[in-house]
Amino acid sequence: MLQPSLLVALLLLLVHLENASGKPPTKELPRPLIPLHDQDQEEELQPELEAKATFQSTRNGRSRRPTLMDVALQQSVRQGLDAMTELYGRIQPEMLRNGQTLQDNHPAAMLSRFNAPTTDSERREMAAYATIAAAKAFRKNFQHIDELARQSHTQRISLRRTALEGLCPPRDPPPCMPASERYRTHDGTCNNKRRPRWGAAQMPFNRFLPPEYGDGVDTVRSSADGSTLSSSRFVSLLVHGAREGEAPLTLMIAQWGQMLDHDMTSTAQPRSINGSIPSCCGGKDFHPACFPIKVPLDDPWLAPLKVRCLEFLRSAPAQRRDCVLSWREQTNQVTSYIDASPIYSNSAKSSDNARVFRHGLLVYGRGDPAEDVCQRGAIATKCIRSGDGRSGEQPGLLAMHHVWVGEHNRIAMELSELNPHWSDEKVYQETRRIVGAMFQHITFREFLPVILGREVVKLFDLELMPSGYYERYSSKVNPTVANAFAAAAFRFGHSLVQNSYTRCDRHHNVINNNVSLHEEFQRGDIGSAGSLHRLLRGLASQRALKRDEFITPELTNHLFQTPGFPFGLDLAAINIQRGRDHGIAPYSAWRVPCGLSPILSWDDFANVVGPESAKRIGHAYRSVHDIDLFVGGIAERPVVGGLVGPTFACIIAQQFSNSRRGDRFWYENGGFESSFTPAQLHSLRRVSLAQVLCRTVGGGTRAEFGTRRKPSSRRRRRISSSPASRTLMRKS
């Protein structure tokens, strides 16, 4: 990606716009970030890697004596397989017998259910665990070699001709059917014709920067002085406490952000036997995935309850496609593309469960519309069959699923009427294609400019085309979601969440609601007629909290707290712990690759986040180089005209640049069988989230992300069958 010229950068620094954060805007602007680590580059070295791993010389067919490295590799592979057998054959059954599993009502059990692995993920997890154990053993067996050489060996040795070969991913590309020329596959394969698994579900996250693990493979990094990092709960208490203050933004922006996050990321947590969830606090023996959060002795909320530990499981390890000894990676269970997968699922089999198989429709409701409460605005998991298991986390998210299932069915019925000769499959796929394009357009047209500011949007070439086709698609751009995006940067929205949800009547008058946010968790089902409409009006009217490092106690003390349970989880601590689990490099490591000023001292840090924030964060860490990416990134002053700071803006903007440039099905692309006609594209460019919500709720709904402007009459009117939408429905 081209770097902006110095002149343009200097001109941009002079721009001063009002921000949604309470902090003044920073004068720093990120530059495009270039990924430093790409697994597919290593796959091209596969013949060389295999030559190092085999006992047979490829020259003249002659055998050779095994080298010291050969012996160490085979020994390490055996140790890896033994470790896998020990875990699945002894440790897990023993933990189940000893009752070292979480009860269903435990907050951590609820969190794990939303991060449940698929069957494919569980199989890959076993292979990944053996590979990681082998890599750790190999590094230990090669301790006499200097660090650089050992690190190089660990990254360059194939396992395909070892005892682990049977667990390696298949080399053959996935089958790409003729239909994949026009329609996306549900699992994201075959989007890129040269690299058909790029961006697909069940693939490891990409990395913008190499990970930082304590042992170079999978242990948690240490402090810069070699000591243990501060407890993530300790950091949360010092840095992420509550502070009042609202932003000129509605909660709809946080809700769209969550929907979009679920479209692009899903990380699995491991399971034990029979789907049980290992307990990590209080037992003598721990599951290898255990990474419990230590609670400070003076914790104002948990100490009086005699809680000394918060449950936490590491993300399930991922199996690398190149099947080499390597560091721990994590699996993204959903496609990396913006494709509305929360509605349609990430596998064809799962998507079938949500379909009626008539007129391309999705399941919505349970019978006669006149008698069905689902058709009269109830919010309930029984009303729809979501493509994502997280849809019932909280009512706002479930409401958005209802909206988009309803929008799919509206479009499908219009398509069926306009094209009565089309089959159910044709109507379904064409509707899915349109809804995916709407997701993309709303994200880039309405969401990203608010999050990043228009200057960063311009720097990273994220502006949508006013007319014509987008011509920057490249099969060389990997759209796979970056680990730092999923585990840190895109979690900024947690600071926007309010203490409770507001409901509004049809006149936008607030309805009294004494239910706190944590009481809404997993209370997605609100079976009364009209509850969907009241909640959507509330999301479109209620102000979000300021985007800063402060997070509501509803999320830091009560996350997934169940009735009768005395406490909940801490989302800020989970974010910090997850970053360490994934080996995310500390905050200071990201500044220079983003073209930002380096952070070498606490004074440097204070210049970026402000003296008050720097002081509190300084009490939580021994060194400025210890600061976790989530903590440092969310504390930064916002970029000009945007919501997030420059480091998060860099990571988020780079990811969405990759998501657009690396997607063959991007809605603005021309020249493909999947491309929209100019007339259809013109119609798509007129789509807004307000229109979609108005069709669900009725006219007069204010549905902008910001609250600065008075809604125009165009946004307020009901548009169920406009000429523009009819143009979009016509056959291309």
Image: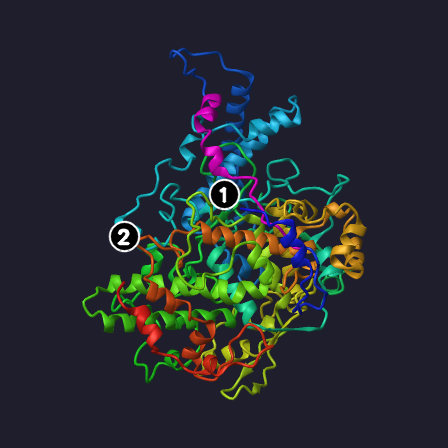
Q: Is mark 2 on a helix, strand or loop?
A: helix
Q: Which of marks 1 and 2 is nearer the N terminus?
A: 2
Instruction: Look at the picture and state if 525 lies above or below 629.
Output: below
Dot 2: within a 10 Å radius of its alpha carbon, few (fewer than 14), some, or many (20 or more) residues?
Answer: few
Q: What residue type is labelled 1?
A: Ala
Instruction: Look at the picture and state if 694 lies above or below 463.
Output: below
Camera-side residue: 686 or 495? 686
The residue singled out by tag 1 in the image is 318
Q: Quadrant of residue 556?
A: bottom right
x then y, percent, for residue 142: 61, 24
The residue lying at 39 percent from left, 62 percent from top is 436
Which corner quadrant holds the C terminus? bottom left
Residue 47 lies in the magenta stretch:
yes
Can residue 630 be seen in the rendering of this structure? no
Q: Is mark 1 on a helix, strand or loop?
A: loop
Do the residues bearing badges 1 and 2 touch, measured as CB atoms within 8 Å?
Answer: no
Is 233 situated left or right of 313 in this image?
right
Q: What coloring was used for the rendering?
A: rainbow
x then y, percent, for residue 278: 55, 51
The residue singled out by tag 2 in the image is 179
Give the residues drawn in magenta, as a range.
29-53
The residue lying at 67 percent from left, 48 percent from top is 591
Camera-side residue: 214 or 336? 336
Can residue 400 be seen in the rendering of this structure? yes
The residue lying at 63 percent from left, 64 percent from top is 643
Q: Which amino acid does label 2 sit on?
A: Ala
